[in-house]
Image (cartoon, grey):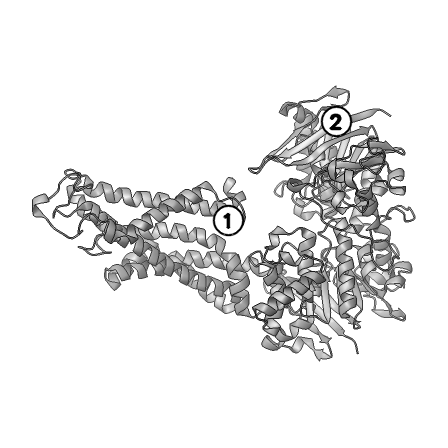
Amino acid sequence: MALLEVRELTKRFALSRRKSWLEREAVTAVNRLSFDLEEGRTLGVVGESGCGKTTLGKLLLRLVEPDSGGVRFLGADWLALRGGDLRSRRRDMQMVFQDPQASLNPRMRVGEAITEPLVIHEGLGAAGRARAAGALMERVGLPGSALRRYPHEFSGGQRQRLGIARAVSTRPRLLVADEPVSSLDVSIQAQILNLLKDLQRQDGMGMIFIAHDLRVVEFMSDQVAVMYLGRFVEQAPSRALYTSPRHPYTRALLSAIPPAPGEEPREAEGPEGEPPSPSAPPAGCPFHPRCPLKEPRCESQAPEWREVEPEHRVACHLA
Amino acid sequence: MNAPKPRALKWGAFFLLLFAGVALLAPWLSPQNPDRQSLAERLEPPSPLHWMGTDELGRDVASRMVWGARVSLGVGTAAVLATTLIGVLLGALAGAQGGWVDALIMRAVDIFLCVPTLFLVLALIVFLGPGIENVILVIALTGWTDIARLVRAEILSLREREFVLAARTAGASPWRLILKHLLPNALGPVYVSVTFGLAGAIMMEAGLSFLGLGVQPPTPSWGSLLTSGQDYLQTAYWLTLFPGLAICSSMLVIYLFGEGLREYFNPRAAQR
Amino acid sequence: METLLSLENLHVSFHTPQGDPEAVRGVSLELRAGETLGLVGESGCGKSLTALSLLGLLPPGATQTQDRLRFLDREWDRPTPEDWRSLRGREISIVFQEPFTSLNPVMRVGEQVAEVFRLHQGMARQAAWAASVEMLKKVGIPEAASRARQYPHQFSGGMRQRTLIAIALACKPRLLIADEPTTALDVTVQAQILKLLKRLKREMGLTLMLISHDLGLVAQMADRLAVMYAGEIVEMGDLQAVLGDPKHPYTRGLLACLPRLGAQGRLASLEGQVPEISYLPYGCAFHPRCAHAFKLCRRRDPELKEVEGRRVACHLYGSGE
């Protein structure tokens, strides 16, 4: 049984602009997404800004409610949970945020902040809390002596460690990490990525790793899904996706990464144009205006989401 | 939060404490009994015995000023505390709950805002009758809207911040969210606003008492002292000068403190 | 090759009540006409401040001193505000990271480019507009004539960055400084902007100083590379030499911790934190994070010395004999 099963998940946001007087314009941020995640595995989600990857994370965490679709988590209907039931199940799914500056309450001492989930779920007392805080700090490689400090006294990388400590405090089964290293310096990114991998291995957590950086995603993930205008356009085991991409957009993304020093030199080439506004997505295949291989049917007919090889799914007429 | 405390804050706090000290220690500081009349000493100018002179009934003005501080500052403080309590409570509720609760509270705010405050105050006080308790009540009832709007706006912007989302994913209850995460971070600007509210409340009390609608004689307050002095403006300047100075300087001190607080909470904005 | 700009011993300090910490500590560099110099480092290493001090654009509270600033055969040791104005825009231009806040939201895009022509070259309104449309065409804005009439919010991020490049290049400067020009953009758009910069550099004979935290990006563009750490250049030389065989432990560490496609297991990582400028370690600023640090590193800050065809500031290489 899969840890997480997502079916046809959809979220639309109404804009303040109106189409007519009765109807507001809307953006379909997440459009009928379906995927599974096994225990202890990592699904990487890549895409450019505005593709809906952050909304996907928030939907899974129930920070935003979907319009339709289903989510089963740990064998139960995750979307049916309400109020206190939902709050008590939240310990099994936690999130690491992008901005370590903003993800800690500036007026809470860090010892208090990282143990808050434990206080909520296990009603720890002061002594238990101090013990748990010390252990958590050690797990994420921070000195236990820093527990009484405030978040602003830490550097960006250290604050991200605190955010991670808090997220893993309840030993969740699934960790959703939304751009956890994109605001960090290069030399710090590696530390945080290694830490996330270590913690995942120790606890056997599943992970949804959302990022725009294809290198980082490849390093972290077993499976990678490429998102464009609210949909998955390709999903495959990491190795397969990077070595034999099937969707033209995936190929374009891969060719746009500048080669790292030491890799085979080549000119970085991206696709032409920029992603269209999600409030007015193109008809047919959403990628067709930028696609070098476009055919007439791409303009009118949306491609199906189909399996072209075991575990390798693509939404493209030509794949 | 470790920024050096601005100078305005230090001096403002110092003088504010001085005023508060005078008010609190009135029974010991007051040179004489403020109500003791002495017809032999009517309308005497300031002298070593009566530093601020005497009034038309021969009462010691300095003593009445000290006791008046108690009433003026006391009423102001009580009123502003009540204002804040109502404002923070309703503002937090509106911001954190949203939906119809928010709509209801904000429409109430709109209604209060579209009636001129002075008219509302006068109407209420005429309806309720003059007196210390009613002055406090009226100021609180008419002043809460500013704080409520401020708190609501702060909470609305905080609600989308990542640490609040993090608390939600941790399973925090709505109450925990409000008390531990939203309110403590929303209160910075509220402190500033409360300080200026204090100045407003003291002014309002002085105004009402001056009009005879506030504190009733013989209880001294700075506003009522001004009233009783107005008949003698040309012959006994000390009856109006000292209460006037007291009101004025308390305003200055409060504003100084408020500016200091603002700078403390938002160092960059204050430089501009 | 002709030297376009040479800067010697630049210091930038910030005035604070607690003292005047230095954010740039003795940077010297040369730009040869027509080359691309990549300036690489992490946040707070002083790379942007170094660039801004070439234009006299330091933020309030920051002061710069240098022993020598030579640009186009003229010495500008103590440039006055007028000196800066005559250099800025005309001879040296800069493109910033933020394409979203750098344009005036209530002015037509074409006007904003035309303004440069009017102010700097005294062109008449119509001529300036025509030149503006021409410039927008040159930076690859499709249907430039009608697009010029639009407002910035109608432009995508990539087109805004193109517009900013057009503004920067309107007066045909000799030197273009690009400070993280693609950091705020998507990967696919980043590739387009880099291509554009390469083309413009060739067409206009520009000298380019490219500032970035991204070694991969700089590797694609630069001829020479300078790596900065804690306000100093720690290694500088030809791109191939530095990347192919990095000498400074920091350069090595930075290269090693980049995730590579197809790599497995753990990433090599630089432990520790980037130091804050007010609490710099004594001696070599990198020594607390350096695996090779020895006694001397804790005592003395190494100077840049010639090592195998590039310059390195590290005691591991011939420590002062």
Badge number at residue C76:
none
Residue B34 can be seen in this image: yes
* Residue A207 percent location from the top left of the image: 76, 66
**Where on the picture, by quarter, is residue A101?**
bottom right
Q: Label 1 vs label 2: CA separation? A: 41 Å
Query: Tag 2: Cα neighbours inside 10 Å, few (<14), some, or many (≥20)?
Result: some
* Residue B237 percent location from the top left of the image: 19, 39
Per the image, the residue denoted by label 2 is: C8
Answer yes or no: are tags 1 and 2 on the same subunit.
no
Query: Residue lying farthest front?
Result: C295
**Where on the picture, by quarter, is residue A104?**
bottom right
Q: Please report contact status of discs 1 and 2: CB closer than 8 Å, yes or no.
A: no
Amino acid type, residue under disc 1 in the picture:
Phe
Query: Tag 1: Cα neighbours inside 10 Å, few (<14), some, or many (≥20)?
Result: some
Q: Nearer the viewer, residue C205 or B92?
A: B92
Q: Nearer the viewer, residue C108 or B144?
A: B144
Q: Is residue B87 above or below residue B16?
A: below
Chain of the residue displaying label 1:
B
Amino acid type, residue under disc 2 in the picture:
Glu
Q: Nearer the viewer, residue C319 or A64?
A: C319
Per the image, the residue denoted by label 1 is: B265
Residue C58 can be seen in this image: no
Position of A307 compared to A59: left or right? Answer: right
Give the structural element (helix, strand or loop) at label 2.
strand
* Residue A248 percent location from the top left of the image: 86, 58
Query: Residue lying farthest top?
Result: C74
Q: Which residue appears at 75% of the width and 69% of the height?
A: A203
* Residue C186 percent location from the top left of the image: 76, 51
Give the structural element (helix, strand or loop) at label 1.
helix
Chain of the residue displaying label 2:
C
